[in-house]
Amino acid sequence: MMPPYITTKRYGLSRTLETRTGDICYTSYPKSGSTWLAYILVLIVNDGETPEDTTLRDCLHWVASSWTYPRSEQELRGLPSPRIFKSHMPYAMALGGDPSRSPCRYVYIARNPKDVAVSYYFFEREKSWSGNYSGPWEHWLKLFTEGRVQRGDWFDHVLGWWHSRSLENVLFLKYEDLCRDFLGEVGKLASFLDYSISQGTLEKIRERTSFGAMSSTEFSNMHEIQEFTGFFREGRIGSWKEQFTKEQSEAFDELCARRLAGSGLEFDFD
Ligand code: PPS
């Protein structure tokens, strides 16, 4: 199930797009910290400097979307390297076709599903460009656990990329690791992309992409997008605790144990 702005035509283009060495595609299930990752990527490829006279959104290429800055195939082809692509697609629907045959490097970011479900609930509410959702939390949680929200089943999405993490052009990150060990994770990311960055640049990236800095800086606050206020909501691990009841939390834990069993994939919820 896709948002209305993911059109068949644009999706088709995203699948057949010819990727090239140097391309970077960051991907996630919605509300998993992908915008944070996007700014980190932009800074890595620009040696820690924020590009001038532009915005974060305009530095990214969301090929499957007809909404933010849609670019033609020709324009995409003419963009200088490194091109940074955004995607929220599962592995089987990745940008550029099958990742195992693509020269593009894919960075996937996953987040604990309780925080994802809550963040997604607040994000989807009354958005004219999306589903205009206005139901109660209980209903949303039911839809989410049944995989009946946009982008489908969270477990399928995350596990598809998790099982592909041994490909040399796929890096699997977690939001919680980025919160806990920012410098270590960004160092890992830079070396995966073959960028060598100094400690000073790493520190600069940390400052510029902090929750406070990102939400208050014109480059990254995304105020140019209609109905986007509140996008920078909590920016932390564990805000689900203010939303889930004890019963909902227990049922969700059971679901996670069942769906993630044997995968080796675990999340921090606190
Ligand atoms: S989207 O709309 O699907 O692309 O959303 P996405 O960017 O993937 O995820 C949005 C959540 O990420 C939080 N966020 C951050 N957390 C920590 N640090 C920084 N810099 C940061 N930037 C965004 C954002 O607040 C959303 O999470 P919640 O829990 O709603 O606050």
Image (cartoon, grey):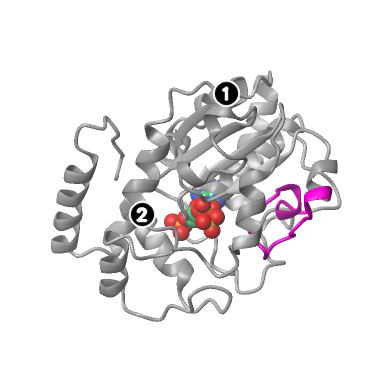
Q: Where does residue 50 sit, x and y in percent of width and height?
A: 77, 42
Residue at the disc numbered 2: 115
* Figure quadrant of residue 257: top left
* Figure quadrant of residue 229: bottom right
* Figure quadrant of residue 106: top right
Q: Where does residue 239 sit, x and y in percent of width and height?
A: 35, 56
Q: Where does residue 7 sit, x and y in percent of width and height?
A: 60, 64
What residue is rendered at 81% in x and 53% in y?
54
**Considering the image in quadrants, where does the C terminus appear?**
top left
Crowdedness of circle 2 by 10 Å Cα count: few (<14), some, many (20+)? many
Magenta part of the protein: which range?
55-74
Above-or-below relation of 27 to 245: above
Q: Is residue 125 left or right of residue 156?
A: right
- Which numbered disc flags the more N-terminal residue, 2 or 1? 2
Residue at the disc numbered 1: 187
Above-or-below relation of 193 to 116: above
In the image, what residue type sits under mark 2? Asp
Residue 209 is at least partly visible in this image: no
**Considering the image in quadrants, where does the N terminus appear?**
bottom left
Q: Which mark is residue 226?
A: none
In space, the residues marked 2 and 1 are separated at their CA atoms by 25 Å
Task: Say whether residue 236 is magenta.
Answer: no
In the image, what residue type sits under mark 1? Gly
Task: Say whether residue 56 is magenta.
Answer: yes
SS class of the residue under badge 1?
helix
Above-or-below relation of 223 to 133: above
Q: Where does residue 126 sit, x and y in percent of width and height?
A: 49, 79
Confirm or reject: label 2 Cβ below 8 Å from ligand 1: yes
What residue is rendered at 32% in x and 60% in y?
147
